[in-house]
Amino acid sequence: MTQPIAATLIRGDGIGPEVVGATLRVLDALGLSFSWDEQLGGQAAIDETGDPLPRATIESIRARKLCLKGPLGTPIAGGFRSVNVTLRQELDLYANVRPVKSFPGVPCRYENVDLVIVRENTEGMYSGIEHWVDRDHSAAESISIITRTGSERIARYAFEYARREGRKKVTCAHKANILKATSGLFLETTRGVAREFPDIRLEELIIDNMCQQLVKDPTRYEVIVTTNLFGDILSDLCAALVGGLGVAPGANIGHHAAIFEAVHGTAPDIAGKGIANPAAEMLAAVQMLRYLDRRPEADRMEKAIRAALADAGSRTGDLGGKANTARFTDAVLAAL
């Protein structure tokens, strides 16, 4: 008998439990056996334990090395620090991998988009080094940390990913013309790694031009590698090009653990109404299966999601349809 796959499960806040529950239905239908250790994070964890990221949650992921996670709430400006950022730094999940694909039937401006953003996930402007510089809180300072080690490992991840997936170009998005030390170090290091991959072309674009070129023609790009803040912004820009965050999954990958999640928010305004779109969370599970080298199941699941998205009768409201969460999930199961 095949041993169940041990993994941590965080259902999340807002619509999180709904989209995660829908995703578990599809994973069950694939015939895969998971041993889930359910843990808390975000507002749900505060309500129960007083801590947005309990130590038990971190230790569960450390032990199982795998996590499927729903969206977690993070206050804007005040309140506690982002749980997502804390998890990435605590577990050294240095690679944020965001596939961006166009889906037949999903309203968007482009067809045949198939690119991946590989974002450095632990350094840069999200290093967590910031403070007020005066007693009146009229000025604040944030420090961006870029290291050669961090830059090298994310660049290597991008090139190895490109080679493994049969892609021929990696584009480095940077701001080395202005941020000569930090962004300059990232670009210089990426060039060095690129020399080890002569079969893959390195393209360099300044970040503002990168945004412009993506809006003009995203089909030109295959793998984009960049620093933390730039990658965060590019990821959402690219999601909008293919229909929005409702079809945007993400992976946070390190040497010793990986977390897979929908990258949209908790959508408290529709939580509990049964109308949330679970496609992004399901696509995150597809990423998880590929990470586990369960490609046949991953391909089946993605094909079924694509079929459900192509049918106007099973698309949810955010994608121009009228279906609810259960109806979309049923359509995915039927396509399986």
Image: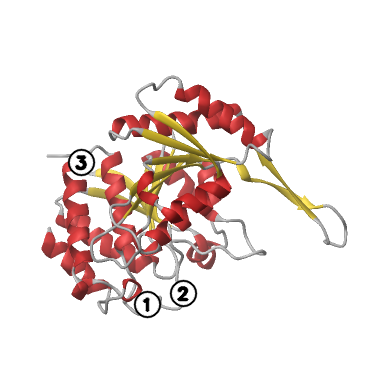
Q: How would you rate the neighbour count of disc 3 (Cα within 10 Å): few for under 14, some for 14-19, many for 20 or more?
A: some
Which mark is on residue 76?
Answer: none
Residue 181 screen position, x and y as percent: 69, 33
Left or right: residue 195 versus residue 175 is left
Who comes first in sequence, dot 3 or dot 1? 1
- C-alpha separation, residue under disc 2 versus residue under disc 1: 8 Å
- C-alpha separation, residue under disc 3 versus residue under disc 1: 33 Å
Which mark is on residue 272?
Answer: 1
The residue at the far front in this view is 216
**Position of 35 relative to 315 (above/below):** above
In the rendered image, the quadrant that contains the N terminus is top left
Left or right: residue 313 versus residue 61 is left
Does the CB distance between marks 2 and 3 fall below 8 Å?
A: no
**Kind of residue at badge 2:** Pro
Q: Which residue is mark 3?
A: 295
Q: Which residue is mark 2?
A: 268
**Position of 290 relative to 43 (above/below):** above
- C-alpha separation, residue under disc 2 versus residue under disc 3: 34 Å
**Kind of residue at badge 1:** Gly
Who comes first in sequence, dot 2 or dot 3? 2
Q: Secondary structure at mark 2?
A: loop
Residue 198 screen position, x and y as percent: 38, 21
Q: Secondary structure at mark 1?
A: loop
| Residue 93 in sight from this viewpoint | no
Residue 29 screen position, x and y as percent: 15, 57
Comparing labels 3 and 1, the label whose residue is closer to the camera? 3
Q: Using the rendered view, name the quadrant where residue 13 is placed.
A: bottom left
Left or right: residue 266 versus residue 247 is right
Residue pictured at 21% horizontal, 40% vertical: 294
